[in-house]
Amino acid sequence: MTFDIEPVWLAIGFAGQALFSARFIVQWIMSERVGKSVIPLAFWLFSVGGGVTLLAYAIHRADPVIIAGQAGGLIVYGRNLWLIYRERRNAAA
């Protein structure tokens, strides 16, 4: 099996996957610190970073399955960030 992927796009793909995977490490560490399951802001930020990077990679590769999955995920991540922002804004008021 040979992979015909430009090195820069291979790096972008792996960077996106690393960002996307980092969110689980952040979530695990934070949950261990507080002794219960939590989803910190960094989880959603890594989700967006990884999702955008992987979406760019998927578009370059013209992979409709990954495009659909990442685009749909970005809607969820964005909504969660908006809810967090709104909650913090209301708490500050």
Image (cartoon, rainbow, N blue to C red):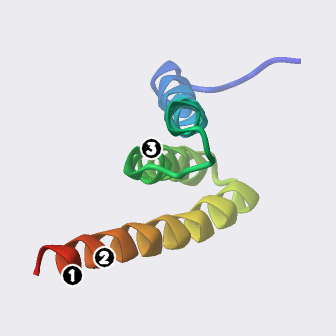
- The amino acid type, in three-letter code, at marker 3 is Phe
Residue drawn at 21 percent across, 81 percent down: 90
What is the x, y in percent for residue 76? 54, 71
Residue drawn at 61 percent across, 70 percent down: 72
Picture layout, residue 44 above or below residue 87: above
Q: Earlier in the sequence, mark 2 or mark 3?
A: 3
Query: Tag 2: Cα neighbours inside 10 Å, few (<14), some, or many (≥20)?
Result: few
Label 2 with label 3: CB-CB less than 8 Å? no
Q: Which mark is residue 82?
A: none
Q: Which mark is residue 87?
A: 2
Residue drawn at 56 percent across, 66 percent down: 71
What is the x, y in percent for residue 69? 68, 62
Q: Which residue is mark 1?
A: 90
- The amino acid type, in three-letter code, at marker 1 is Asn
- The quadrant of the picture occupied by the C terminus is bottom left
- The quadrant of the picture occupied by the N terminus is top right
Q: Is residue 70 left or right of residue 66?
A: left
- Cα separation, mark 2 vs mark 3, equals 20 Å
Q: Earlier in the sequence, mark 1 or mark 3?
A: 3
